[in-house]
Amino acid sequence: MVLLTDRTGRFERNFPKPMKRAKIVIPLLILLVAILAIVFREWRKPPEDPGTWTEEGAWYKGNTHTHSLWSDGNDFPDMIVDWYKEQGYDFLALSDHNILSRGEKWMPLSQVEKRRKTGDHGTMAHYLERFGEDWVETRGETGSEEVRLKTLEEIRPRFEEDGVFLLIEAEEITDQFKQFPVHINAINVGEPITPQHGDSVVETMRNNLRMVKEQSERLGRPILTHLNHPNFHWAITPQQLAEVVEEQFFEVYNGHPGINHLGDADRPSDEAIWDMANTLRLLVHEAPPLFGVATDDSHHYHGGEVSPGRGWVMVWAAALEADQLVEAMQKGEFYSSSGIVLKKVEYDRGTRKHRVEIAADEDVTYETKFIGTRRSTPKVTGEVFETITGKEAEYHLTGDELYVRAVVTSSRPHKNPSYPDQREQAWTQPIGWRK
């Protein structure tokens, strides 16, 4: 390396004098390599801080992981949409496994009722009671009757309202490598995406993300992806999640009780995975950190453990439109929640202060932890920098932090817990890492 940068001409003596062309070619090759290295580094480094969030906007509540009878859920899609709208959600993504709610799909009533998790076989009765015979389509003789599942385009006019409620088309791309499930939700898709498979967990993730990117560019629409439940069957390690820098989001909380949210004695929790992966991304892969999404992953709507209303995102966007919501999330302009509402999430780049203000309820206490990894001690991931009690919390970055995120926990138990002793929480996105 010294010879290649020596300006005295000594490196020329390493070659026979007849090789005059080499005097021109070698410096050009060196220059080309240098340019490519700079371009590669610029491409890989975290993007510039866009500054403040969208000035004119509003908070929109939504769930990006929901299942219906189109795959392995146990209720009709229109019944599910009706529930979320009644509960005050602003947007919902129906994300069934490897399928979009399109085309003609008939289902035997016996299968519909069999999926119900309680002894009261009344799924069809509830459907008819809510929407009536003019809406519900059946065919066949008694004992072999079938019901037609409504498509997303049929459901939209009945529920969507400008600025009030929006349905976003989505799919859970359900793949696996050997025994390890690799599930990625694609939000705002325009076409179904077939699982691409791969020769490793990392390659399987990358192959599917590549297809999402191809569709996004071809159709000219932003599509958000998030890696689902990394601890489900202990499928995704922090190292693998860090390596796939093409993925920007993962589920820091998933309401399915069987996804090992808390980890175990030998394996990290979802939150610990977040900090480990983000540390590796920033230090080793020179890539932006992951943003954390909270979801329901709901399957059961009238009995059963995998029920709705457990986790959601709150997105700050200029309008309740699919592209606007996706683009806002891609910039990190959202927080995730399992019950806590935040009034403000602020980061002042000048003063380097991260501030959270909670929409506090009476008789409830709140504890905010500012968490991250220090540059000086990178092996200690997910360190709690400061803990503050109250409805407002502020942390002043010192410059040693690779990133900082906040997690707010209330004293109130979760209304529909997915694990023992669960309390309501909210998670902000990592800040302080951008150049």
Image (cartoon, helix red, strand yellow):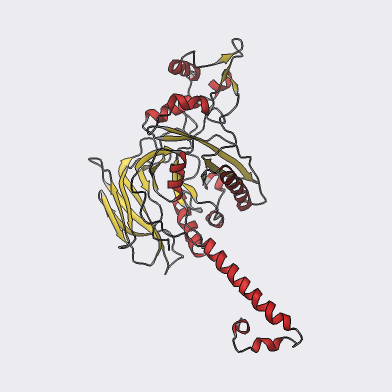
Judged from this view, the residue extending furthest toward the left is 362
Q: Is residue 153 visible?
A: yes
**In the image, what residue occupies the spot 36% across and 46% down?**
426
Q: Position of residue 414 (x, y in %)?
A: 36, 39
What percent of the width, then of the height, locates residue 238? 52, 55
Task: Locate the C terminus by quadrant.
Answer: bottom left
Image quadrant containing the N terminus:
bottom right
Residue shown at the point (36%, 67%) measured from the top left: 399
Direction from residue 279 to residue 110 in the image, left or right: right
Q: Is residue 300 above or below residue 384?
A: above
Kindly indicate the quadrant of the structure image that contains residue 220: top right
Residue plotted at (56% across, 57% down): 243
Query: Which residue is nearer to you in this view: 163 or 99?
Result: 163
Q: Nearer the viewer, residue 301 or 54?
A: 54
Whether residue 285 can be seen here: no
Is 1 placed above or below 422 here? below
Q: Quadrant of residue 396?
A: bottom left
Q: Find the residue positioned furthest to the right.
A: 18
Q: Residue 384 at x, y = what percent? A: 36, 59
Residue 180 placement, left or right of 426: right
Q: How many marks?
A: 0
List x then y, in percent, for residue 121: 50, 18
